[in-house]
Image (spheres, rainbow, N blue to C red):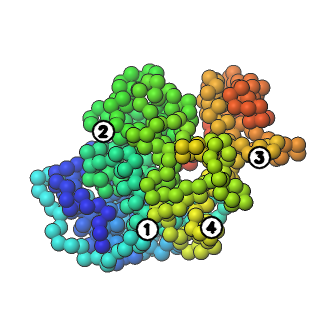
Amino acid sequence: MSSLFPALADAPADRAALRFGDRSLTYGALGAASGALAARIAGAGRVAVWATPALETAVAVVAALEAGVAAVPLNPKSGEKELGHILADCGASVVLAAPGDELPSSLADLDRIEVEVDVDVDVDVDLRATGPLAAAPASDEDPALIVYTSGTTGPPKGAVLPRRAVSHTLDALADAWQWTGEDVLVHGLPLFHVHGLVLGILGPLRRGGSVRHLGRFGTEGVARELNDGATMVFGVPTMYHRIAQALPEDPGLARALGKARLLVSGSAALPVHDHERITAATGQRVVERYGMTETLMNTSVRADGEPRPGAVGVPLPGVELRLVEEDGTPIASYDGETVGEIQVRGPNLFTEYLNRPDATAAAFTADGWFRTGDMAVRDPDGYVRIVGRKATDLIKSGGYKIGAGEIENALLEHAGVREAAVTGEPDADLGERIVAWIVPVDPQSPPGAEELASHVAARLAPHKRPRKVHYLDALPRNDMGKIMKRALTHD
């Protein structure tokens, strides 16, 4: 079995690997802790991981992967019913958790193994095991992670991510982002999603670099770590929006961000307005990438490529990507305007939805393309721009196929709009009418519906203007900052 993390054996023992707050581990200490835990769980089949933002979560997942055991990260905020479904579905018999973590009753029937982490190890002492780990052999196709993803209906489905998907994605991103062991990553993402866990923890460890987790995102923490040598920042649009808002009053934050080698945004589209505000204040351009739980990463703007606000770049090495019409016919040529559904194929894909052969079969075409459900346009030079989800963001109005994302970007350029979401609702004449959901900058004096419609029509086209506007105090969002459009109900 080849290790996903050769640096566990090869990196200098005193090189920094992980830091969460004031607790940290060197590669020597991480290798010792993960090796000891891997020996305890070898042969366990599948292990649940209580995925708090802590050193113990990182050690637990690394140990599972080193032992050839599939890790099932659990969201500590999940309710009892959802946790019960996940545990029954995945068949885990063991849960890995930090000492002192209080676990809900739905985990009571699992054997608990506490993840022991010694942060006081002398950095000059290498405690890593010298012999091979006595674990069952694992192939590239064997499961590395089972990550549960919520659909629009029914309970969450477990996407089985093989070891080759993890290694391929991280190596492809290293190529695209010129990511090396010299990089120091800072982020505050949760560790039960692929963004925070696979990219944000396993990525640096595969490169032999280091990661500093903020525990909880804050602009002060980002600035502090960048001023202390961090080179990369990973975040979601909500985080970058907060950065953009803070920059005018915080020149120190702007200077710190200007030191970064790479700023990366993902998990949802970053509004063009926030791109522009960050670039104007820092001289830095935020790089966007596109992925899903089932596919890990598909595309990215390259570190040496042209950043385009609103674009998620080009397919990563080894990833095939195409846009198709509603009937599945591939779009023959790309003009930057024609909207189609993204389908992808490559070694980055998951193998199946656990225990759901029906859902697995429905997700793939006969020749192996994964139906993402995401709608996009593609420029002639290959750059991809996401316009939204097929189920919630594609609006068919007056004979046009319209992506909600470009309208949201236009609305956010209005000085009176703080947040915006766009949906469609049935209309007897148009088929669907465009509806805007607005969080105004000044709730006492919000911009009027006609003003917003004219604003959008002037920037895009008259048929893309909102026909109705709702005003809200806040938009409903999930843990990753994505707007939950199904929670937006029409009159």
Packing grade of label 2 (10 A; few <14, some 14-19, many >=20) is many
Residue 162, which numbered label? 1
Mark toward the start of the polypeptide (2 vs 1): 1
Residue type highlighted by circle 1 = Pro
Mark toward the start of the polypeptide (3 vs 1): 1
Q: Name the secondary structure under disc 4.
A: loop
Name the residue tied to disc 4.
365
Residue type highlighted by circle 4 = Thr
Q: How far is mark 2 from mark 1, CA to CA? A: 30 Å
* Residue 385 image point, x, y percent: 58, 43
Q: Is residue 191 visible?
A: no
Name the residue tied to disc 2.
230
Name the residue tied to disc 3.
396
Q: Name the secondary structure under disc 3.
A: strand
Q: From the viewer's perspective, is 14 left or right of 426?
A: left
Q: Nearer the viewer, residue 47 or 331?
A: 331
Mark toward the start of the polypeptide (4 vs 3): 4
* Residue 224 image point, x, y percent: 32, 33
Residue located 11% across and 52% down the image:
124
In the displayed structure, 225 sits above or below 266; it is: above
